[in-house]
Image (cartoon, helix red, strand yellow):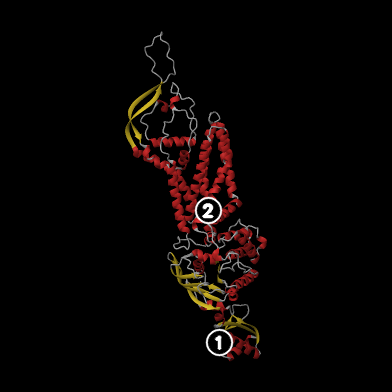
Amino acid sequence: MTNEFGGIVVHAAARSFGSVQAVRHIDFEAPPGEVTALIGPNGSGKTTLLLILASLLAVDSGSVRVGGIDPVADPQGVRRLVGWMPDSLGRWDSLSALEVLTTTGALYGMSPEERTARAHELLETVSLTEYTRQPARVLSRGQQQRLSLARALIHDPQVLLLDEPASGLDPGSRVDLRTLLRTLAAAGKTVVVSSHVLSELDEIADRAVFVSRGESVRSQTLDEAGNQVRRYNIQAEPMDALAAELSGHGMRFEERGDSRRVEYQVMLDSTQQAAWLLRTLVLADVAVTAFAPAGGALEETYMSLDTDRR
Amino acid sequence: MSVKMQQPPQTADERTLSTRSAVGTVFGLEMRQRLRGRAWYIMLAVWFVVIGAVFLLALATMGSYMDIGAMLFDLVVGFVLFFGLLVAPGLSANAVNGDRAAGTLAVLQVTLLTPGQLLAGKWLASWVGSLAFLVLSAPFIFWALALGGVPASEAFISLGMLALELGLVCAIGVGVSAIANRPLFSIVATYMLVALLSLGTLITFGLSTALVMEEAEVTSSYYSYPMQNEDFDDQSPEPQPGDPECITETLVQTVAHTERITWMLAANPFVVVADAVPYSRSTPDAGQSGDFGYVENYRPPGVMEGISQQVRDFQAGPDYNVTCAESQGLARDVDDKFPIWPLGLLLQSLLAGGLLVLGYRRLRTPVRRLAQGTRIA
């Protein structure tokens, strides 16, 4: 799956800052051609791991290979391959959007013609063409974010590391981002996305690595996540009939009051079981008005990990 | 939203970043930001007004001296150096950690740019930024030159040394900015280092003179009016007043062996600039002094020339034989002394170089040790 020439393989990575252990033990794999989500609560070591992958930070121990290259031994080699979009909005205020991209392109060793062409192309990709000559400071937060994404893509990297790329984006831009990332993955790039907006990742990611307190606690593909035990919310008119039917099949359910209407939540083992239950309810003449997973597949895993949320 | 996947003309593995292109890009990035901000122009305007005011004031008050061109030129050089030492740290000492604070440093570090190229580009940009102040002083420099009395060699070397000193101060500033985390701290630290060079060397020198005091036999000269003849009579012609004669006497004095400690002054920017300039103006030599110890064409030295003479004098050590001419203010002939400015440049370069090396080590990535309280991005 992950060979010598592409993708990311991290084994037992650890990194501390003084007495703070930001990364204790992370195993991480991101194969080429797939979008890998890096999921975890704030301060769980996501950004630190991405800095390690971007060759900015050295690991204290463990092994890291990005496209088969060790970032500590050959940072330049890794940098040719990697595009990194930081979570902080660092920007050169007085430069135009075009100049931001061409300057970065120059520093990746691209020729003037090549970087200018690529910059125009990317401005189109992230829908910022009207800001080509505008100073970057007039851009809104979401536009900055898109410019930052374009900057990470300027040298057509094989590996893309995106730290919270969706934050600050309007719904339309989120859809665009999803399409773009799927396109890049389809072209064989290795894409790593860190986020805690789980519903986003459900649709973007092929696989997910969950980190908590600096440790990778779970790694699964979205298919696996979809087939695990999940909670479903069910609503019907009236609710009594639903309750009777569920009890009749010996299913445990609990009443949930945290949405606007009362709903029942049941645990189902698989999508097959969900399909069976829905059919059973409908055939029993229960007027089902809502029948849906309680959260995204990744959210289910996230919650089940019982991590240190405060 | 789609991204074209056609193969770029060069594949990623083939791309390399030449040092020239890297330094040029960083330089261009810095200069573009500076030229588009307002702060730099305001500083330039203030500079122009201040230096213009000083120049015109000096022109008005020194109008009576015959060698006013040289005097004014010297004054402008001294003043430009003084203000340059104030401006250069401001332009250089937040070059790297300012980017760190703005979150743009990591964006540079993640490219093929090396720490050395980054420092070189930043340094070049701050140097060129401070050279603009020198260029802005040009009208006054040319004005002074137009008044005559300054050989071209002196003018060129003075300006060259000014540019060099600004470059060294910028290097110190960029080095400190790469080492320190906070811009405020690095700017203050750079000012302290410049003060250490400019004033600290003087203070150290002054305090050290107490350590090199020795008793020595010294011949000193002074002019005195001859004693009136007490027993003159009316027949003798009246003594003419105003016929001073030179009196020479030998006595034991405490002298300072400044020649042993003058090297301490070498790193002073004013000393470096003053000492490097060959002051080959028409200086009357002692032999031409008039009969009455009155030196014809006596010309007071300019600010920088005065510093140069003073340093050469310190280098020569105690003057065991003060001649009559010297007592009239003529400098003694100490031109054969070893020039001190190369030592000064060496010391300053070592300081700047050392700071840049430390800064380079802080900029190396992947970072192994990170200072407390810093974030990479």
The picture places residue A105, in percent across and down from the top left corner, at 58, 61
User: Which mark is nearer the camera, 1 or 2?
Assistant: 2
- The secondary structure type at the circle numbered 1 is loop
Q: Is residue A25 above or below residue B61?
A: below
Q: Residues within 10 Å of mark 2 (few under 14, many from 20)?
A: many
Query: Pointer 1 indicates a residue of which chain?
Result: A
Q: Residues within 10 Å of mark 1 (few under 14, many from 20)?
A: few
**Residue A20 placement: quadrant:** bottom left
Name the residue type under label 1. Answer: Arg
Query: Pointer 2 indicates a residue of which chain?
Result: B
Which residue is drawn at the image coordinates 49% and 26% (left, top)? B297
Q: Is residue A270 above or below residue B310?
A: below
Residue B122 shows which numbered tag? 2
**Mark 1 vs mark 2: same chain?**
no
Q: Which residue is mark 1?
A: A252
Residue B133 shows which numbered tag? none
Q: Is residue A253 above or below residue B62?
A: below
